[in-house]
Structures are given as structure tokens and as C-alpha cells.
Image (tube, rainbow, N blue to C red):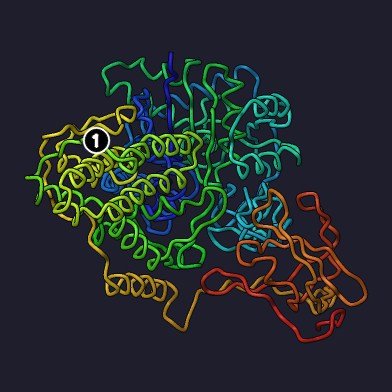
């Protein structure tokens, strides 16, 4: 019996609109995979919904002077609508503020508590006296003790990926008031992850075909040893803790958010009129569970959530977690706070969804960060969708309409070229399927477009504009073959550009529900009617792209206060001159640079500081290629205590400056290596 498939996409925070980075990370790749599986007649349910708890929601509410419920109501409906307009085919889109979710989260938490999974612990936590509240992880910012990134959050450094607690941060400040917090005692329930690490590792060893970037990050966490993590928070917005003595606290958002997949599946089952059907997808061994997420959610989906489900014992564990890396925009880090983003609802005001589905699909950040640019968008639409796929379809249908009365010609005595072209349908179909099954979505799309290229090349080589006069049957055979390739493309390309392929199947007179396994070289029968139809893809003009680039530039300038201004980081607390003189900064020169295995953000640098050569680990990999920085003059904090990062001992810190767009620049000096900088 074939397995059922349960697919989830990371629940987006309901505190803002959806942008291209979100889409490329967790939603488009999942949708392409799900649509392919449906064509394969797999029993698949695709679940998502709004994450409506946690600090980002409360911060947004405080900024706007409204309640958290106002925020989540607004963005839940907005995002649900834009996902539908972009053709993301969720079977159900729930929300974590629902009664079903609250009850489900509390039931799971209570069982784990009753089973003795959690431990009580009184600890000193950061407290904002002005705001009169304890500061959860994301309410605290400071300097990462591992890489020196000054915008690290209290739960994780987004520069180097290190797991943190607020007390780990150097010079922590409250995100609420900007004040330096004090410490105060509070009691919470903790998940002692180290206690269950061995069991988790044994399970991870059974996982197959996980992306190296995913397993690499997981192994890095495990190698460092898992520590206790609080599963409760001192907040008022969230799922109340269902344990006596903790009623004034709420569940940690990363406890309740993944449970949103379960509660949304329950709501889907209720919607189907079969309330117990959710159990077939969460409590049956004949199910494959796949989480599509962004890289910043790897630890929660590959360590914490599976560990909780293991200890509960009644739920399936993920078969795979194909996490994607980050999408950059026009060569820069995407930043909503700086206005450097393209929001999906605004995109859809100007262009069709299918165009972006294709272009983003061809450059998904599957194993490393990728980039979206409007010029590349234009190039791929014009040279691939229009000139290859669209051109092939239009030539085929227009020739059929004009010279064969709009009906499929009969194939008689096909040549070797005819047979080879038809055989390519099965060959490409197999390649496409193999890549989808391995979550290599980019390769699957490339192989699909290759079939259109094969068709275009065959059409050109067979020269039907000549053979229609010289040898009408050869021309008929050519059009017959091209129509078969077109019909195959209408199904094989459906996961990527569903609306356009629906149009194509209508032109070709094909049924809407053709399955993947039905695709072959004989989908269309001789004599069946074909419509020429409209050109599927119009080319995008330079003026349209210039308008989008100007819109992006204008927003970035507006949100930074104008072209010549920017939001500067506030000055840190005043220090004495003696504190400054204790820092030994020396001129240096990078003599060697290389990537560190399984550390996407870090480079291992060999630096000449005059009196010796140092090894320094620096979190600059997203901004610099190792080969480009050999010979770079730098400033080095030379008297920092050594620190082990990803198994490499780092002896110093490279000084960097952050530009308005978030990119890093070296603090340079022309002084000889070893020279003091004062």
C-alpha cells in the first residue's frame, strides 16, 4: 500500500505581509512538490496557517498601539488571500489563535508534563524595569559572543546561527525601551534536551536524503551538546500553560507553533466531515511527513519538535525537512525594516503569478543563498518562458490551425528523428520525477524546460514551413510529434505554472485531470481539434523593469529617511578612556581565506599581524568570496581571548562596518601588519 503524504510549510508570523524571501523559502517549493505528488495520484494533504503567538506579534502590536488580536486578524486574512492569488494550493490554512489549536497544544503539553518530561527551574532572567516585565528571547538584543554580530537576538544569532540565551549576549538591551535590563528570579518549565539527545541522534541516523545544509546545521548543534530550553514564557499573549502554579505564563511559541500543523489538520478533517481523519496523517505509520521551512527554523523542526513528539509517543516524525537557505534581493540582504523587499501583494498588482513562480523556482536557495533581481526576472521570462516554451507552443498550434484545419495530423511512417523526439517525453518525464522526489526542485524545473527546448529544436530542424509543400506527410508527422510534446508539457509544467498550463490544455482539448503516469507520446489522437489560442507569454519591456527598480529604491530611501540619511544604531553606554586603551587593535593582512565545512556564515582567515600569523574565524561569508579577500588590509582586535567556533580556534576579531543596506565593509588601514591602531 502506498504511503500517505503530509506536507507542511512553516507557519508565517501574522505580523506583516508576505515577501519574496518567504515564498522562496517555504511555500513555493512545497507547492511545486505537492502539485507534482497530486499528479502522481498520491494521497497528500498540504497544511499551513498563521503563527499568531510569540514576541514578533506583541512587538508589532506595541508599535501600532493596538492589541495582538488586531494584528493577527489583519495579517492572517491578508496573507491567506495573497497565498491563494499566488496559487499556493494549501488544503487548509489555519491559525494558532483558534480554540482547536489552544486545546491541542495544552493537551500535548499536559501529557508531557504528567509524564515527567519537563523540569522546573528557578533562574535569573533579564527584566526591563521601565516596562515592568521579564524579557523573552526576542525582546533582547546584543552582541553575539561567538561571532561579534551586534544585532543578535536572545535565542539565536542570525549571523552565525549559534543558539543563545539572553544571558549569553554581550551588552544586552531591551527591545522595548532600549534600556539595559536587570536580572530577576522567575520559575519556568524546561525541556532538558541533553537528556534526550542520544535518542534523537539515533533517530536522525535513520534519516535518508536530507540536504547537507540541513543535516550539517543539526550535527553542529548536537556536537556542541544540547542544553535545557524553557518551554514557558512570562507573557500574557499566547496559549496559557495548563499546569497549576504556572497559570500566569504562556507556552513558548516554538512549543505551540509546530503543533499548529496538527491542530490545522484536525480543523481540515472537521471541514471534510470526518473529524477523526486527522489521525490517518499524524498517528499512522503509513505516512510520510515532510516539513518545508527556511534555514532559520531548522533547529526547531529537526531537534525540538521531533524530540517533543518522541517523548509524547503518539505522533509520526518527519521523513524529511528540506530547508532552504535565504533569498537576497538585487545582490543585497533582504530587509523589511529598510524597505529592501518585494511584497507579494504588490508584485501581483503588476505581473502574473506564474511568471514569478517560474523565475523563483529556477533560482530557489536550495543549498546556498540565491539572489532575485528584476533584470534576471525579465531575462528568464523573455528568453525562457516566451522564447522557448511560449514560442514552441505558438508555432505548433498556429501551424496546426493554418495547415491542418486545427486538428491533430495522423502520424505515418515516422522517421528516426520523429521517434527520438517522442521518446524524449518519457526520458524527460523520468528525470523530472527523480528530481522532484529528491527535493531538487530547481533541477526538476530545468529538465521540464529542457523538453520544451527539445521540441523547439526538433521543430526548427524539421522545417515544416518547407515540408508542407515538398512532403506534406513529413510536415504532418512533425506537427503530430510537436503536439504530443506540447500535451506532455501541459502536465509536466503544471506544478510550476498551473494557470498557463490550464490554458494550454484547453487549447489542446485535453482533460483537466490528466495524471503524471498518463503522460506519454500518444496523449492526443489524430483528428482531435486544436485551437491556436493566444500567445501564452508576453515579453516584459525595459520600462516595466525600470519602474520596479525605481519603486524599490524609493521605498528604501523613504524608510531610511531620505537618500542622504539612515537609521543609525544608538551609541552604547559611555566608557572610560582606560576601557578603550585596554583594547589592542593591530593592522593586519589576510593571506588566506577558506570556507568552514557546514558553516555557511563563517570564513576561516589566516591573518598576518606582523609579529605572528593568526587564525581568525569571521562571520562574513555571505558578503565575501574567499578568493576575493586574500591580500585585504584589515584592522584586528588582537587581545581577545581565543574562542572555538565550529571546531576552529579563533584568535582575534576582524573589524567591520555595516552599510545602510546591511552589507559589510572592511575597516581598512594602510599601516604595516602589526602596527598599533590608536
Which quadrant, please, contains the C terminus?
Answer: bottom right
Q: Residue at x 86, y 66 (%)?
A: 614
Using residue 204 as the reference point, say whether residue 495 is left or right of it: left
Q: Residue at x 64, y 67 (%)?
A: 624
Q: Which residue is mark 1?
A: 413
Q: Between residues 281 and 231, which one lies in front from this camera angle? A: 281
- Tell me where residue 206 appears, x and y as whole percent: 64, 25
Q: Residue at x 57, y 38 (%)?
A: 300
Q: How many marks?
A: 1
Instruction: Using the rendered view, name the quadrant where residue 643 is placed.
Output: bottom right
Q: Is residue 4 visible?
A: yes
Residue situated furthest left in the rendering = 405
Residue situated furthest top in the rendering = 1
Instruction: Using the rendered view, name the quadrant where residue 433 is placed.
Output: top left
Task: In the rendered view, tell whether residue 102 sits above or below residue 621.
Answer: above
Circle 1 packing at 10 Å, graded few (<14), some (14-19), many (20+), is few
- Tell me where residue 676 appears, x and y as whole percent: 85, 82
Q: Between residues 624 and 256, which one lies in front from this camera angle? A: 624
Instruction: Using the rendered view, name the quadrant where residue 609 is placed.
Output: bottom right
- Tell me where residue 227 appears, x and y as whole percent: 72, 37
Which quadrant, please, contains the N terminus?
Answer: top left
Q: Between residues 596 and 443, which one lies in front from this camera angle? A: 443
Q: Residue at x 15, y 34 (%)?
A: 526
Residue situated furthest front in the rendering = 470
- Tell me where residue 412 appears, x and y as whole percent: 21, 35
Label 1 element class: loop
Task: In the rendered view, tell whether residue 372 sits above or below residue 598.
Answer: below
Using residue 123 as the reference point, say whether residue 486 is left or right of it: left
Q: Between residues 51 and 107, which one lies in front from this camera angle? A: 51
Task: In the rendered view, tell whether residue 177 sits above or below residue 120.
Answer: below
Amino acid at each position: 500500500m502506498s504511503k500517505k503524504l503530509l506536507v507542511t510549510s512553516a507557519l508565517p508570523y501574522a505580523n506583516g505581509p508576505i515577501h519574496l524571501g518567504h515564498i522562496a523559502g517555504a511555500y513555493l517549493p512545497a507547492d511545486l512538490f505537492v502539485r507534482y505528488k497530486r499528479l502522481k495520484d498520491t494521497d497528500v494533504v498540504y497544511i499551513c496557517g498563521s503563527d499568531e503567538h510569540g514576541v514578533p506579534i506583541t512587538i508589532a502590536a506595541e508599535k501600532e498601539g493596538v492589541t495582538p488580536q488586531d494584528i493577527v486578524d489583519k495579517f492572517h486574512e491578508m496573507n491567506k488571500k495573497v497565498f491563494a492569488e499566488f496559487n499556493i494550493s494549501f488544503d487548509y490554512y489555519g491559525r494558532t489563535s483558534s480554540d482547536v489549536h489552544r486545546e491541542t497544544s495544552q493537551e500535548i503539553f499536559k501529557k508531557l508534563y504528567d509524564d515527567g518530561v519537563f523540569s522546573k527551574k528557578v533562574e535569573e532572567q533579564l527584566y526591563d524595569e521601565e516596562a515592568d516585565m521579564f524579557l523573552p528571547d526576542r525582546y533582547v538584543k546584543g552582541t553575539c559572543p561567538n561571532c561579534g554580530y551586534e544585532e543578535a537576538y536572545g535565542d539565536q544569532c542570525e549571523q552565525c546561527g549559534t543558539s543563545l540565551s539572553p544571558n549569553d549576549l554581550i551588552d544586552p538591551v531591551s527591545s522595548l525601551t532600549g534600556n539595559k535590563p536587570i536580572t530577576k528570579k522567575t520559575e519556568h518549565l524546561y525541556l532538558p534536551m541533553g537528556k534526550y539527545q542520544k535518542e534523537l541522534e539515533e533517530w536522525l541516523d535513520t534519516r535518508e536524503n536530507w540536504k547537507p545544509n540541513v543535516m550539517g546545521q543539526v550535527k553542529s548543534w548536537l556536537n556542541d551538546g544540547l542544553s535545557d530550553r524553557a518551554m514557558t514564557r512570562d507573557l500574557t499573549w499566547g496559549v496559557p500553560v495548563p499546569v497549576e502554579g504556572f497559570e500566569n505564563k504562556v507556552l513558548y511559541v516554538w512549543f505551540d507553533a509546530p503543533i499548529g500543523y496538527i491542530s490545522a489538520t484536525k480543523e481540515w478533517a472537521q471541514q471534510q466531515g470526518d473529524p477523526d481523519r486527522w489521525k490517518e496523517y499524524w498517528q499512522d505509520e503509513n505516512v510520510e511527513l515532510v516539513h518545508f521551512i527556511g534555514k532559520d527554523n531548522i533547529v526547531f523542526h529537526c531537534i525540538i519538535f521531533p524530540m517533543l513528539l518522541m517523548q509524547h509517543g503518539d505522533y509520526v516524525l518527519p521523513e524529511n525537512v528540506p530547508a532552504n537557505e535565504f533569498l537576497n534581493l538585487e545582490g543585497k540582504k533582504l530587509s523589511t525594516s529598510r524597505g529592501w523587499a518585494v511584497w507579494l501583494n504588490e508584485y501581483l498588482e503588476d505581473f502574473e503569478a506564474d511568471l514569478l513562480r517560474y523565475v523563483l523556482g529556477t533560482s530557489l536557495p536550495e543549498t546556498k543563498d540565491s539572489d532575485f533581481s528584476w533584470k534576471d526576472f525579465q531575462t528568464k521570462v523573455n528568453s525562457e518562458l516566451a522564447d522557448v516554451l511560449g514560442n514552441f507552443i505558438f508555432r505548433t498550434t498556429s501551424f496546426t490551425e493554418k495547415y491542418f484545419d486545427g486538428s491533430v495530423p495522423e502520424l505515418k511512417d515516422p522517421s528516426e528523428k520523429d521517434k527520438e523526439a517522442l521518446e524524449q517525453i518519457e526520458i524527460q518525464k523520468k528525470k523530472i520525477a527523480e528530481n522532484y522526489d529528491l527535493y531538487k526542485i530547481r533541477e526538476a524545473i530545468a529538465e521540464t524546460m529542457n523538453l520544451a527546448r527539445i521540441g523547439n529544436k526538433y521543430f526548427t530542424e524539421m522545417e515544416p514551413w518547407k515540408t508542407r509543400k515538398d512532403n506534406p506527410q513529413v510536415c504532418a508527422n512533425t506537427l503530430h510529434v510537436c503536439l504530443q510534446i506540447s500535451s506532455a508539457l501541459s502536465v509536466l509544467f503544471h506544478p510550476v505554472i498551473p494557470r498557463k498550463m490550464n490554458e494550454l490544455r484547453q487549447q489542446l482539448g485535453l482533460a483537466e485531470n490528466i495524471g503524471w503516469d498518463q503522460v506519454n507520446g500518444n496523449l492526443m489522437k489524430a483528428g482531435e481539434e486544436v485551437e491556436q489560442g493566444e500567445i501564452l507569454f508576453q515579453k516584459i519591456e525595459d520600462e516595466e523593469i525600470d519602474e520596479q527598480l525605481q519603486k524599490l529604491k524609493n521605498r528604501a530611501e523613504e524608510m531610511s529617511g531620505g537618500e542622504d540619511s539612515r537609521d543609525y544604531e544608538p551609541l552604547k553606554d559611555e566608557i572610560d578612556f582606560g576601557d578603550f586603551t585596554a583594547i589592542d587593535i593591530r593592522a593586519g593582512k589576510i593571506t588566506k581565506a577558506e570556507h568552514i565545512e557546514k558553516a555557511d556564515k563563517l570564513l576561516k582567515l589566516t591573518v598576518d599581524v606582523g609579529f605572528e600569523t593568526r587564525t581568525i574565524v569571521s562571520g562574513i561569508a555571505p558578503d565575501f568570496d574567499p578568493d576575493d579577500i586574500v591580500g585585504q588590509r584589515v584592522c584586528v582586535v588582537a587581545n581577545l581571548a581565543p574562542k572555538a567556533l565550529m571546531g576552529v580556534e579563533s584568535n582575534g576579531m576582524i573589524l567591520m562596518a555595516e552599510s545602510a543596506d546591511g552589507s559589510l565593509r572592511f575597516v581598512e588601514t594602510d599601516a604595516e601588519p602589526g602596527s598599533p591602531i590608536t
